[in-house]
């Protein structure tokens, strides 16, 4: 059984640093994982596409006891080869929780033609899950149909998502979801989010967050947290 979460980042180097630091297994497609930060950056600079989304992120989590870190990494690598042709990919496998999981980091810019990778919305997560389930079934692993987690969107944000654009609030949600499993307190969460450029303000009644590209804080309740 493998579950899927999707995300993206405007700071690829920080995501790679996080994923690499805790990796028990690592591999790459058209890119040695130990040089992923430098090679991803060089490709984006070569095509003059350094702004906006720098990398896409797939978290592929397996049922406890079904796979070893090596097997998980192999499945993650095959998944990336199906989904991201023409893009450099680094696959990092973590085993620091009760379930083994892959962090699959895809360079947003193709080294072949400079095109941006597209991985947005409900259709994207269904496409990734279908490919992941196929690879799991080939190996006799269980699969599960699981709807994506619901989040509260404002009407303006929903319009942005449907148009395939990026919501800064959604990016905060994704990063919080990405790091929250490795922290034990709000203070630790604030420290971890700082690595991604997100400021946190904690009061007795509220917790608020500020995206590095925006001036104002937004309360956690407004993010559906």
Image (spheres, rainbow, N blue to C red):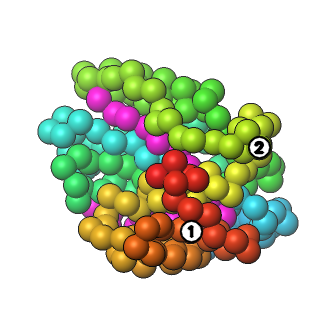
* Rendered view: 10 above or below 155: below
**Percent of width and height locating residue 100:** 26, 48
Q: Residue at x 45, y 75 (%)?
A: 203
**Percent of width and height locating residue 51:** 78, 66
* Rendered view: 195 above or below 209: below
Badge 2 is on which residue?
156
Residue 55 appears in view = no
Range covered by the magenta-colored residues: 1-25
Tell me which label, 2 or 1, sits earlier in the chain.
2
Q: Is residue 107 left or right of residue 177?
A: right
Assess disc 2: are there few (<14), some (14-19) or many (≥20) residues with their C-alpha within 10 Å of its C-alpha. few
Q: Is residue 167 left or right of residue 130?
A: right
Q: Residue at x 46, y 36 (%)?
A: 149
Q: Is residue 206 found inside the magenta-colored segment of the image? A: no
Instruction: State the SS at label 1.
Output: strand
Badge 1 is on which residue?
209
Q: How many labels were placed on the picture? A: 2
Do the numbered discs 2 and 1 sit on residues whose CB atoms are within 8 Å?
no
**Percent of width and height locating residue 66:** 19, 35
In which image quadrant can residue 109 be found?
bottom right
Q: Is residue 100 left or right of residue 197?
A: left
* Rendered view: 158 above or below 123: below
> Can you tell which mark lies on residue 99?
none
Instruction: State the SS at label 2.
Output: helix
Q: CA distance from mark 2 to mark 1?
A: 19 Å
Q: Residue at x 74, y 34 (%)?
A: 162
In which image quadrant can residue 125 be found?
top right
Of residues 221 and 5, the one nearer the viewer is: 221
């Amino acid at each position: 059984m493998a579950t899927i979460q999707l995300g993206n980042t405007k700071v690829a180097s920080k995501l790679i640093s996080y994923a690499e630091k805790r990796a028990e297994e690592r591999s790459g497609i058209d890119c040695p994982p130990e040089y992923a930060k430098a090679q991803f950056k060089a490709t984006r600079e070569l095509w003059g596409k350094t702004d906006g989304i720098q990398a896409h992120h797939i978290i592929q989590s397996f049922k406890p006891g079904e796979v070893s870190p090596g097997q998980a990494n192999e499945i993650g690598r095959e998944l990336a080869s199906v989904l991201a042709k023409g893009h450099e990919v680094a696959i990092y496998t973590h085993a620091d929780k009760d379930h083994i999981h892959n962090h699959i980091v895809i360079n947003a810019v193709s080294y072949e033609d400079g095109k941006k990778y597209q991985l947005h919305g409900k259709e994207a997560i269904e496409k990734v899950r279908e490919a992941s389930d196929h690879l799991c079934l080939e190996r006799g692993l269980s699969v599960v149909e699981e709807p994506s987690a619901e989040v509260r969107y404002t009407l303006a944000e929903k319009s942005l998502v449907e148009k395939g654009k990026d919501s800064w609030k959604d990016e905060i949600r994704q990063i919080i979801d990405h790091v929250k499993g490795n922290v034990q307190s709000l203070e630790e969460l604030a420290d971890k989010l700082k690595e991604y450029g997100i400021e946190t303000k904690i009061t007795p009644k509220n917790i608020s967050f500020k995206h590095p590209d925006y001036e104002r804080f937004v309360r956690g309740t407004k993010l559906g947290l």
